[in-house]
Amino acid sequence: MERAELSITVQTSPDEVTMLLAGEIDVLTVTELSTLVNEVLAAEPPNRIVLDMAGVTFCDSQGLGTLVVLSRKAQHNQTVLALANVGDFLMRVLDITGLRSALMITTP
């Protein structure tokens, strides 16, 4: 079986960091995402971190849990962690799990 990959492209502006995610957010890739977000928060935290989910093809329970943990951690650092371009499948998963209210989701 081919190992799922997650590619993350980081774009930084003065008060916002955008991470373009492509691939799968799961048990194999959450560490990479957590590390990047934690590094941004450890430096000078921006006002907003946007996770652009347009390229995300899959997100498992580990991925969802990580998103919630990162969101809380960002809040603790007075930073807003927002999800952008959340696809229909992921929105359904967030609705089913009740996590939609736990995450900031921006709609275009």
Image: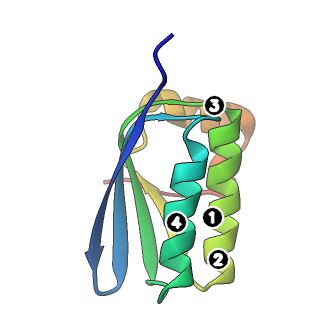
Q: Amino acid at mark 2?
A: Gln
Residue matched to label 4: 37
- Separation of marks 1 and 2 at Cα, in angstroms: 6 Å
Query: Could you tell me residue 85's position as x and y percent?
Result: 36, 46
- Separation of marks 3 and 2 at Cα, in angstroms: 23 Å
Q: Please tell me which residue lies in front, 102 or 64.
A: 64
Residue matched to label 3: 60
Residue at the spot x=44%, y=70% of the render? 49
Q: Please tell me which residue lies in front, 45 or 31.
A: 31
Residue at the spot x=68%, y=55% of the render? 68
Instruction: Pick whichever of labels 4 and 3 is earlier in the sequence.
Output: 4
Instruction: Pick whichever of labels 1 and 4 is earlier in the sequence.
Output: 4
Q: Please tell me which residue lies in front, 29 or 49.
A: 29
Q: Amino acid at mark 3?
A: Asp
Give the image quarter of residue 71.
Answer: bottom right
- Regarding residue 79, the answer to whether it shows in the image is no
Q: Report the coloring of the rendering.
A: rainbow
Q: Amino acid at mark 1?
A: Ser
- Separation of marks 1 and 3 at Cα, in angstroms: 17 Å
Within 10 Å of disc 4 (Cα), the crowding (few <14, some 14-19, many 20+) is many
- Separation of marks 4 and 3 at Cα, in angstroms: 19 Å
Relative to 29, residue 1 above or below: above
**Res. 71 mark:** 1
Instruction: Pick whichever of labels 4 and 2 is earlier in the sequence.
Output: 4
Question: Does the CB distance between marks 1 and 4 fall below 8 Å?
Answer: no
Relative to 45, residue 94 above or below: above
- Separation of marks 1 and 4 at Cα, in angstroms: 10 Å
Residue matched to label 2: 75
Question: Does the CB distance between marks 1 and 2 fall below 8 Å?
Answer: yes
Please name which of the two marks, 4 or 2, marks the residue nearer to the observer: 4
Question: Does the CB distance between marks 4 and 3 fall below 8 Å?
Answer: no
